[in-house]
Every structure is written in C-alpha cells, then in structure tokens.
Image: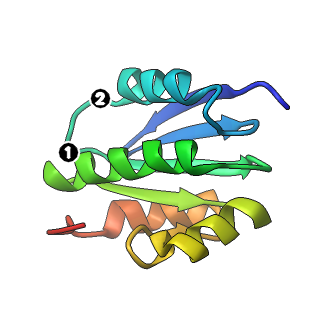
Amino acid sequence: MSPLTLSHQRLPGVTVIAVCGEMDATNRGEFEAYVAKARSSPGERLVFDLSRVPFMDSSGLHVLLTCTTDRLRHGGAVHLASAQPLPTRLFEITGVSNHVPVHDSVEDAITAARASAPERSF
C-alpha cells in the first residue's frame, strides 16, 4: 500500500486538496484531520484532486461525503477531479457521482466550483 500524501493550495474562490496514495481505513483519521486543517471556512468550495489515488474504499468515500455534507450545509461545495478507474467505479456504484460533481480535470473542477451556485441539499 502506498502512503497517503496530502497537500493543498488556496486559489481565489476555491481550495484544491491534492491526494496521493490509497485512501482506506488505515489513513482515514489522517485524511479527516488534514481536510479539517486545510479548509479556510465552512462555506468554501473545495476541489479534491484524486489523480494520484489508485484505490479508495468506503472509509475514504465517507470522509469525502462528510466533507460534502458540511460544505453544502454552509453554502459551499465539493468537486472531485481526475479520479482514476477504481475510485470512479466506487462513485458510480454508490451513486455519489449523482450528487457530487466529478470532473475529468482539476482545471474543469476549479472552473465549475467557482461558477457554481451553492447547492441546497445532499
């Protein structure tokens, strides 16, 4: 298993969190803590760059969904970007892709996050 590496960049109107490595129960706490630290306000827009996440289980998905619910509750949004095949399949099987925008590229996700109106429910 590859270790989890996390970084973030604040851009005008959006924070991009880059995730590298497998997301599972062994690093769920680390991922949750990093997301909490990286956010600047509850109502912000977040983009998760998943281009270097080869595998994600329900633990990683749970963190993304909790974050999404929190953002929506405060007028923000979460966008997922550049997901590899296994995480993409997980989003499809669970129906997450019907509720959380999934974009082909980080640039597309940033553009959509900046342009999107706050969602009302999740």
Count neighbours of disc 2 (C-alpha within 10 A) and say few if under 14, some if 14 to 19, many if 20 or more. Answer: some
> Which quarter of the rendered picture does the C terminus lie within?
bottom left
Locate the N terminus and report the quarter of the image it occupies. top right
Q: Which of the numbered marks, if any, corresponds to residue 51?
A: none
Determine the secondary structure under disc 1.
loop
Q: Amino acid at mark 2?
A: Ser
Residue 18 in view (yes/no): yes
Amino acid on which disc 1 is placed: Gly
Up/down of 7 relative to 13, above or below: above
Q: Quadrant of residue 89?
A: bottom right
Give the percent coordinates (x, y) of residue 33: 44, 21
Residue 83 in sight from this viewpoint: no
**Does residue 8 lie above or below 11 as drawn?**
above
Mark 1 surroundings: few (<14), some (14-19) or many (≥20) residues within 10 A: some
- Residue under label 1, please give it: 43
Q: Position of residue 67 (x, y in %)?
A: 35, 44
Identify the residue at image location x=76%, y=36%: 21
Residue 70 is left or right of residue 28, and the answer is left
Question: In the figure, is residue 11 to the left or right of 3?
Answer: left
Instruction: Single out the residue that lies furthest toward the right.
Output: 1
Residue at x-position 15% and y-position 52%: 73
Where is residue 81? Give x, y as percent.
Answer: 60, 59
Question: As drawn, is 84 to the left or to the right of 76?
Answer: right
Q: Is residue 5 above or below residue 88?
A: above
Inter-mark Cα distance, 1 to 2: 9 Å
Height in image: 14 above or below 41?
A: below
Q: Which residue is mark 2?
A: 40
Which is nearer the eye, 114 or 119?
119
Give x and y (percent) for residue 17: 53, 38
